[in-house]
Amino acid sequence: MAATRDDSVFPAPVYKETVLAPLFEGVKKHHWQHQMRINRASAVMLAEKGLLSRAEAGAILKALDDIVATVDVPSLDYTGEHEDFFFYVESELKRRLGVEVAGKLHTGRSRNDIDHTVFKLALKERLIGFVEALLGLVEAALVVAEKNRDTLIVAYTHGQPAQPSTFGHYLAALIEMLLRDIERVAHAARYPDKSSMGAAAITTSGFGLDRARMAELLGFAEVQENSYGCIAAIDYATSVYAALKLVFVHLGRFVQDLNAWTGFEIGHLYVPNAYVQISSIMPQKRNPVPVEHLRLMLSLASARAESVIVAVHNTPFADMNDSEGEVQAAGYEAFDTGHRAIALLAGFIGSVRIDEARVRRHIDEACITVTELADSLVRAEGLSFRQAHEIAAKLARRMIDTGERFGTVPMSAFAEAFREVTGRAANLSEAEFRRVTTPEHFVAVRTMPGGPAPGALLAAFAAYREELGKARGWLDAYRGRMEAAARRLDAAATALKNG
């Protein structure tokens, strides 16, 4: 005989198991402390506005403390007796204080403004840790860049050897990009720093609440003005995850270079044994698998950030579950995976080194200092750049065909190419020809701001350290406001509890 089903009692078992129980688990893992903090701030603000007596507020605050002290929230099982954690806490307050007092805490509030404020608090905490990790990655890359200011590398365009540069110059490009990424994340962090409390369900309330005081007690920079937007807009989340996604996309491109540079055919980057796994069957294999894991982590982090944006795509501009607990928790996985990738990348960058002998061999084989030969002919011989380029191209084609190098190619080959293009003999001496085609000279003459020459790089490194200092200052202020608010809330709550 089929089991009977009572569809008149909430929640239906399948709804409990597939929706309410997982959401409850998410609150236990991510949000319950923030919700309790909002409860404490609400009690303080309501007392200050005369909507609670000092005695009532003190009793509520003591009961909230007792719930935290006596209830093992992480071990709670969802029974369906209460729809969610909010109603569970409300029932615990009623059990301790009675509905006449406990029921006053919810004056002028809704789960809507509470939830979005909870989500913002959770995002702010994660943003602090994430920016801290990014700053650590920049610092690690900057240390390596400073040590490798003169270490030659092959710079590629379109997948082919293009020009010589230095590892310091290459890492400087990564550093600049990361500093811009930090700036984008910091800008996006402004939006969850606006308090939603006081918006209630969506239109505020008729009670004389103090929205600014709630923002102050919870560590927000300011109140989000429009109450409808507090509940409906959720751009505080989409902005953050859009900024995070860019970080992961950008780092993924850098990791692709690491993948190429560690390959046997290129082999410009030596990976120490601590980062190499051996093959289970092929004894000669050195597998730099951290690069693969980095690529995977960054792809997953990017996808998890994107999942938040996709989840709210084409949804109503209103209160809806698509932007609430489940999607917020999914987004947190982007932070978690991103942290792992950033930590691994910082350690990896600090451990690898450039195989300078192999780099130099490839510089010679690919004739990639030829651009400077053309530039030098313009300066020394008074040629147009197109004339100089044609001479250099003729010589490079011959060298590639014959396997010659700039250090050994006969001077007569250069003289012949020069005469074919100009109709006269070159004034450039052999010693000067050999000098201007070295990678050291190539780097040394690129002294303009942003170039790889030592002076230009030193100036860039100093600027990066200054930017790092400013970013750390922003982070300290952002974190400091939250810490100061926690102290203010504790002091105000203690005063009410002490009568």
Image (cartoon, helix red, strand yellow):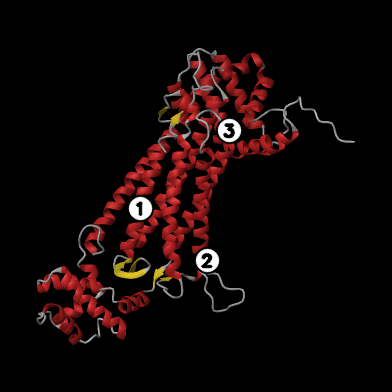
Place of residue 171 in the rendered image (x, y in percent of width and height, measured from the top left): 35, 60
The alpha-carbon separation of the residues under discs 1 and 3 comes to 36 Å
Q: Residue at x 60, y 23 (%)?
A: 62
Residue 225, compared with residue 380, is above or below; it is: above
Say which residue label 3 marks. Answer: 321
Locate residue 292 relative to residue 389 in the image: left or right. right
Place of residue 380 in the rendered image (x, y in percent of width and height, measured from the top left): 11, 73
Amino acid carrying mark 1 in the image? Met
Say which residue label 2 marks. Answer: 289
Q: Which image quarter: residue 279? A: bottom right
Say which residue label 1 marks. Answer: 177
Q: Could you tell me which secondary element the residue under label 3 belongs to?
A: helix
Locate residue 67 relative to residue 225 in the image: left or right. right
Residue 395, compared with residue 287, is above or below; it is: below
Amino acid carrying mark 2 in the image? Val
Amino acid carrying mark 3 in the image? Asn
Q: Could you tell me which secondary element the residue under label 1 belongs to?
A: helix
Q: Which residue is drawn at 47% across and 70% down?
A: 272
The alpha-carbon separation of the residues under discs 3 and 2 comes to 40 Å
The alpha-carbon separation of the residues under discs 1 and 2 comes to 25 Å
Of residues 433 and 278, the one nearer the viewer is 433
Q: Earlier in the sequence, mark 1 or mark 3?
A: 1
Residue 403, compared with residue 232, is above or below; it is: below
Examine the rendering and report whether any part of residue 214 can be seen: yes
Q: Which of marks 1 and 2 is nearer the N terminus?
A: 1
Locate residue 308 relative to residue 83 in the image: left or right. left
Q: Earlier in the sequence, mark 3 or mark 2?
A: 2
Locate residue 249 relative to residue 69 in the image: left or right. left
